[in-house]
């Protein structure tokens, strides 16, 4: 389920993945072209598996050290 509580399809269009990632469509197309994002080809259609996208996001979080609170500036006193 996505943050809106709606069911996420098994395969996402690139524009849908861009929306879920809060990225521009062009950025997602470039990430697919470079092989950074996992894709499935069905005929001429290109789709991103939702489960693979979730794994990719988790891997990026681990790689970047993006833990809750990391990168948050402390309040100045």
Image: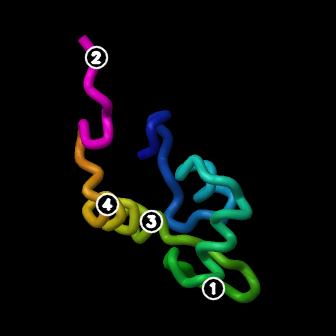
Mark 4–mark 1 CB contact (< 8 Å) = no
Q: Earlier in the sequence, mark 4 or mark 2?
A: 4
7 to the left or right of 62: right
Q: Which residue is mark 3?
A: 53
Q: Secondary structure at mark 3?
A: helix
Q: Secondary structure at mark 4?
A: helix
Q: Earlier in the sequence, mark 2 or mark 3?
A: 3
Q: Which residue is mark 1?
A: 41
Query: Where residue 35 appears, x then y in whole percent?
Result: 55, 84
Nearest to viewer (mark 4 / mark 3): 4
Q: CA distance from mark 2 to mark 3?
A: 37 Å
Q: Which residues are magenta?
A: 69-77
Q: Nearer the viewer, residue 69 or 74?
A: 74
Q: Secondary structure at mark 1?
A: strand
Q: CA distance from mark 1 to mark 3?
A: 15 Å
Q: Nearer the viewer, residue 55 or 59?
A: 59
Q: Which residue is mark 2?
A: 76
Q: Which residue is mark 4?
A: 64
Query: Where residue 77 appears, x then y in whole percent?
Result: 24, 11
Is 37 colored magenta in this rendering?
no
Query: Is 21 placed above or below 42 here?
Result: above
Q: CA distance from mark 4 to mark 2?
A: 25 Å
Q: Nearer the viewer, residue 45 or 67?
A: 67
Please tell me whether the stretch drawn in magenta is mainly helix, strand or loop. loop
Q: Nearer the viewer, residue 3 or 30?
A: 30
15 to the left or right of 10: right
């Amino acid at each position: 389920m996505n943050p809106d509580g709606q069911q996420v399809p098994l395969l996402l269009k690139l524009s849908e993945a861009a929306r879920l990632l809060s990225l521009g469509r062009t950025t997602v197309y470039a990430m697919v072209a470079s092989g950074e994002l996992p894709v499935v080809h069905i005929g001429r259609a290109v789709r991103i598996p939702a489960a693979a996208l979730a794994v990719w996001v988790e891997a990026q979080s681990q790689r970047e050290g993006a833990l809750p609170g990391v990168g948050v500036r402390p309040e100045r006193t």
